[in-house]
Image (cartoon, rainbow, N blue to C red):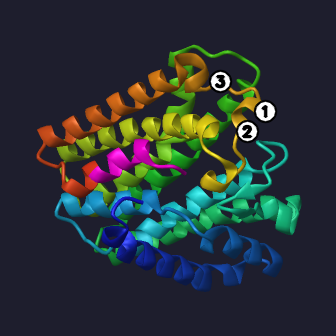
């Protein structure tokens, strides 16, 4: 993460919120499945989506400590990683520098763990929204934003399109549609949720949604570049998987330099959109730039 000292407090607070999530909600889950959920949630992670939510809320003058809501986003993200790694999906053995959940607990338990995380994240997000002082209607809107981003109209829909496209050379517009859903939807939702927590105006929400969508797509482009330029040790997951799975990627279509240029253009667009609304804080710009400068 950029400026480790700047974000370390937030990362620790989100980690504590994830600990609290496990203590509060996993009593309702079968013990072996609960153990797999803890394994998925409590390992190392950038917590980028959580921090984006927090910074968007702060930029709009909202709560600076929306950690429980930020943790709910990380639960959904962790679910997506558990299922993405399954043998029927990308079939990966390493995630965040350690064995994937299904390698440790088996495919049935890993599948159940992922499924358990989604409704628990929704319940946690609703509770968090009420704790922040939002009305029941506003809390319902928070849950809707999170579930829309993770469902068929967002992350799951994008994942399906991605699987269908294996072995197919997609044109740029089709590839960007896949990745705006598969990767970008939850990143965009994280920013939007921060605006909702702050009760931001519709105009401010729209600007932040545009920022989130642009950096979300840039994140996937940067991931594609890292898959061919970084090592497994640097990534914390298996390098070269896109080529092995015959996926359409930005480096394959645009070249590495062309892909980096496209990602950088998206970051500039995102920052310009916020600047026009007076919302571009140094931290939101720093987070956006980090997305294309990171090494994992």
Mark on residue 248?
3
Q: Are marks 3 and 2 in contact (CB under 8 Å)?
A: no
Numbered tag placed on residue 60 in the rendering: none
Which type of secondary structure does the marked residue at label 1 adopt? Answer: helix
Question: Residue 184: where, in percent of width, then height?
Answer: 48, 40
Kind of element beneath mark 3: loop
The dot on residue 241 is 2
Taking the image as shown, residue 64 lies to the left or right of residue 18, namely left
**Label 1 neighbourhood size at 10 Å, few (<14), some (14-19), many (20+)?**
few
**Mark number, residue 244:** 1
User: In the rendered view, would you say 152 is above or below 16?
Assistant: above
What's the magenta bit mostly, secondary-structure-wise?
A: helix
Which of the two discs, 1 and 3, sits closer to the camera? 1
Q: Is residue 213 above or below residue 187?
A: above
User: Label 1 vs label 2: CA separation?
Assistant: 5 Å
In the image, 284 versus 237, the foreground residue is: 237
Q: Residue 134's image quarter?
A: bottom left
Which contiguous range is marked in magenta?
Answer: 286-296
Q: Residues within 10 Å of mark 2 (few under 14, many from 20)?
A: some
Residue drawn where x is 55% and y is 64% of the image:
45
């Amino acid at each position: 993460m950029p400026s480790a000292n700047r974000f370390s407090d937030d990362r620790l607070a989100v980690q504590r919120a994830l600990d609290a999530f496990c203590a509060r909600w996993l009593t309702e889950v079968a013990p072996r499945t609960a153990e797999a959920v803890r394994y998925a949630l409590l390992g190392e992670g950038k917590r980028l989506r959580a921090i984006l939510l927090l910074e968007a809320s702060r930029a709009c003058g909202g709560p600076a400590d929306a950690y429980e809501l930020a943790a709910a986003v990380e639960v959904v993200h962790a679910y997506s990683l558990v299922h993405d790694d399954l043998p029927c999906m990308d079939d990966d053995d390493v995630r965040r520098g350690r064995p994937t959940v299904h390698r440790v607990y088996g495919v049935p338990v890993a599948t159940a763990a992922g499924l358990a995380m989604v409704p628990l994240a929704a319940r946690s997000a609703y509770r968090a929204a009420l704790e922040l002082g939002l009305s029941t209607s506003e809390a319902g809107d928070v849950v809707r934003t999170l579930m829309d981003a993770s469902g068929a109209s967002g992350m799951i829909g994008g994942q399906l399109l991605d699987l269908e496209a294996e072995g197919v050379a997609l044109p740029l517009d089709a590839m960007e549609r896949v990745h705006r859903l598969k990767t970008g939807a939850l990143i965009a939702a994280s920013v939007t949720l921060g605006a909702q927590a702050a009760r931001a105006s519709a105009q401010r929400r729209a600007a932040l949604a545009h920022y989130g969508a642009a950096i979300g797509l840039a994140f996937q482009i940067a991931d594609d570049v890292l898959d061919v330029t970084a090592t497994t040790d640097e990534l914390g997951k298996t390098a070269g998987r896109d080529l092995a799975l015959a996926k359409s990627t930005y480096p394959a279509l645009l070249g590495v330099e062309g892909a980096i240029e496209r990602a950088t253009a998206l970051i500039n667009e995102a920052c310009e959109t916020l600047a026009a609304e007076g919302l571009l804080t140094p931290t939101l710009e720093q987070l956006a730039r980090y997305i294309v400068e990171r090494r994992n």
